[in-house]
Image (cartoon, rainbow, N blue to C red):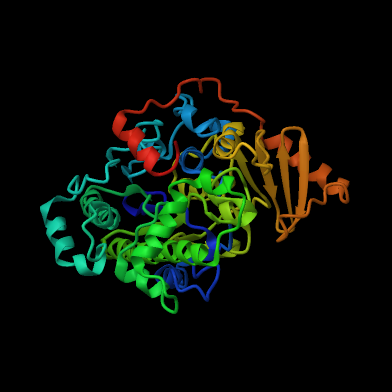
Amino acid sequence: MTTHGALPSVLWITLDSVRHDYTSLGTPDRETTPNLQAIAARDDAVSFDSCFAHAHWTPSSSASILTGRRVSSHGIGFADTTQVARLPDSLTTAGERFSRAGYNTACFSTNPYLGPVTGLDRGFDIGHWSTSHLDMLSGAGIRTAVKYLLNVRKLGGGFSLSPRDHFDPIHPRYQTEVVKGWMRKLSRDGPFFIYNHINSTHHPYNPPVTVLRRYLAGTDLSAKEAIRTARAITDDIWGFMAEERPLTEREKTALVAVYEAEIAYHDTLVAELYKYAMSLDTPVIVVVTADHGELFGEQGVVGHNLLLSDGIVHVPLVVSGLPDMESRDDDIVQHIDVMQTILEAVGADASGFEGVNLLKQSPGFAIAERGPRPSNLEAIRTKNSLYGGEYMTDALAMLRTDTWKLLRNGDEHHLYRLPDEGTDLAKSYPDVVETLSEILDERVSSSPTVEDADATAAYDPETLSRLESLGYL
């Protein structure tokens, strides 16, 4: 892969909020991602069972993917949600690196944090940044609208007069059509790097009714009731946590059903993108993963807040079209490793990356970070002044091996023998704590280390509205 004519294109697909064990890859009995499973089974593909995100939410995780740096090294999303940093000028994005290597670059996202707001659009020749639920035709055109309307009974919100019930399922469909169109256009002029962040697997979940009904089979829940029940919880996550109660069986059934239906719907779109990429007259490396996972009442949390538990950081990862990757399928890997491996494989510059080339070595551990979050606890106590729950609100860093998980919360260390994340064994295994904490301290600062990370993201009213609808503000 060294000559321009032989350079493969790269399609990177990130699904928002998809946790590994809710896919067919992580739990074969869950029939949520049969298409992704089929891709992983190909001779030129590999599925990683131990891929871990760098953070608990999109701005931090996306910035790590696109800069090859850990969270405290790039600073984006380390601070509170109202103080998200912009990309420092000193850091180079994957888009810029691919562009300098002769690639056409494009990025597609409906999450405001992945775009001009944070500066993560840098290096992309083409960018589609949609933040509005009503932005139906941007970049897709009338032909796609007609195509959707002809399939509205299959893809839409059923017999509903709510625009939201129809606009939510249409966004990923339109995004898929736009990405396919740009793959075709860009491939005519040389290799491309396309980063496609699909945000509609993020709560509030609103899958096509026909898909949702499959996941409600055997229950007495209607599709409308399931969506309404799930939405009542995810639209007020802090309020739910303030109640200090477990999800009822009916709430859990509704929440999981709409989540699984979203994943299943997007699995068909991933298959469509993959099939289209394989039809091009050029080799294409395809990556399918998630930026983080989701919790459904574990440790009293719904969504992806406060914690760095495996439900949040353990994500699916399938890589197709990159030879010799199968030798690492049992290893712990992270996104910065995958991006670094691809860049170096195509002869692009990966200097400054903090991962490893997976074709040459294994990382051996995973690191995830979350900045201080005292305001999250304050948001819960605003709902219930007597709230008694305790969470690690100082700067939080995780180091995970196959056996152990170490959490550093400020000056404190907590140790767990996996898969148990509830029993702190730090006092019982001080030597393990010392060994793992030394590794963590060498690689992770307790605060951002970039020198020019003072600029914060600025939001226009439309972006603020979109962030509020996603539960960020």
Give the residue drawn at x 36%, y 62%. Answer: 266
**Residue 145 versus residue 409 in the image, above or below:** below
Q: Residue furthest bottom?
A: 218
Residue 425 x/y as whole percent = 82, 51
Among the 4 quarters of the image, the one containing residue 397: top right
Locate residue 171 relative to residue 43 in the image: left or right: left
Looking at the rendering, in which quadrant would you find the C terminus? top left
Give the residue drawn at x 50%, y 62%. Answer: 251
Residue 123 visible, this orientation:
no
**Residue 316 versus residue 182 in the image, above or below:** below
Residue 28 x/y as whole percent = 53, 74
**Residue 79 versus residue 200 in the image, above or below:** above
Locate residue 141 relative to residue 208 in the image: left or right: left
Instruction: From the viewer's side, name the closer residue of 239 and 341.
Output: 239
Counting the numbered discs, the total is: 0
Residue 143 visible, this orientation:
yes
Instruction: From the viewer's side, name the closer residue of 20 and 256.
Output: 256
Residue 365 x/y as whole percent = 67, 50
Give the residue drawn at x 21%, y 51%. Answer: 188
Residue 181 x/y as whole percent = 21, 53
Instruction: From the viewer's side, name the closer residue of 10 and 79.
Output: 79
Locate residue 65 relative to residue 398 in the image: left or right: left
Instruction: From the viewer's side, name the closer residue of 176 and 251.
Output: 251
